[in-house]
Amino acid sequence: GKTIHFYESLPSTQQVAKELALNGATEGTLVISDEQTLGRGRLARAWHSPKGTGIWTSIIIRPKIPIQQAPQLTLLTAVAAVQAIEEQTDIDVSIKWPNDLLINGKKVCGILTELQAEENQIQSIIIGIGINVNQQLTDFPEELHSIATSLSMEVNDKINRAKLVQSLCFHLEKLYETYLTLGFQPIKLLWESYALSIGKQITARTLNGTYSGIALGINEQGVLLLETSDGKIQH
Ligand code: BTN
């Protein structure tokens, strides 16, 4: 069985999931909160997570894969989130590298994966997923108005969050099984089919720096390949 830890309010589901993982929680353990008071995004940004409006969840997995392949799981999660949202809303969602989900150019979902390793072996990966579901524009801070959206703003209707979480778990589990049996290739093809940026000029911000170039696709490790103006291929 898989355990679900539900909270009305937490600083961050990511933090609780990390502690559970360190204490031996099994693969598939899920932490979900109705509100986060200290939600975190990539690159040390804040993730606005008001009460009752979104899906704020962190899931523990323990894949037995080389550490260099960990980015594959982020891409897999993005595909699962696209499939769940499209299934529940009939809206077209696209992926902006590495793992932002956009609707009409505005961000509706973000993914943050964090890894715990010992002696270069993965102990656990914490997959954090934030989906803006039932917010209205005024629920977002002013500075996000032009760049963020919610599912209900896009469909002009309230979305059932329970069904959406269920669908997210279903697709995540299905893709993860595919990944464990067939490898990354089928996931890579799905990811590329949803990705906006292939063949386009983009700027990728990472903790190691900022790179600009033409996005060529992703390699077997799940790392973006960028062709910079001097013709070099950046990973
Ligand atoms: C990003 O786009 O920068 C990633 C956002 C990830 C947000 C989710 S919400 C659940 C989990 N808990 C957090 O504090 N962050 C992630």
Image: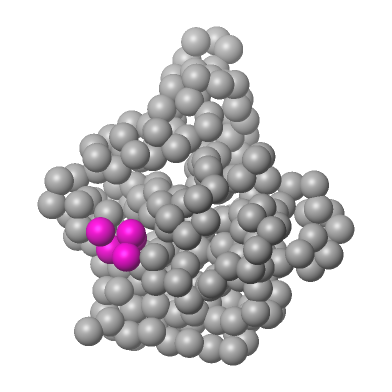
Q: What colouring style does the render use? A: one colour
- Give the residue drawn at x 40%, y 33%: 193
Q: Is residue 9 above or below residue 111?
A: below
Could you tell me residue 13's position as x and y percent? Answer: 52, 77
Could you tell me residue 165's position as x and y percent? Answer: 45, 70
Image-based side of 38 in relation to 232, left or right: right
Q: Residue furthest top?
A: 230
- Tell me, yes or no, if residue 123 can be seen here: no
Q: Is residue 151 magenta?
A: no
Q: Of 186 and 164, which appears nearest the observer?
A: 164
Image-based side of 26 in relation to 37, left or right: left
- Tell me, yes or no, if residue 92 can be seen here: yes
- Image quarter where the N terminus lies is bottom left
Image-based side of 218 in relation to 10, left or right: left
- Give the residue drawn at x 65%, y 63%: 157
Q: Of 47 and 80, which appears nearest the observer?
A: 80
Q: Of 59 and 104, which appears nearest the observer?
A: 104
- Give the residue drawn at x 19%, y 45%: 183
Q: Quadrant of residue 87?
A: bottom left
Could you tell me residue 91's position as x and y percent? Answer: 54, 48
Q: Residue furthest front?
A: 157
Predominant SS of the magenta segment = helix
Could you tell me residue 186's position as x and y percent? Answer: 24, 40
Q: Is residue 37 above or below residue 73?
A: below
**Count of marks placed on residues:** 0
Q: Residue furthest right?
A: 142
Give the residues in magenta: 170-174
Q: Of 23 and 54, which appears nearest the observer?
A: 54
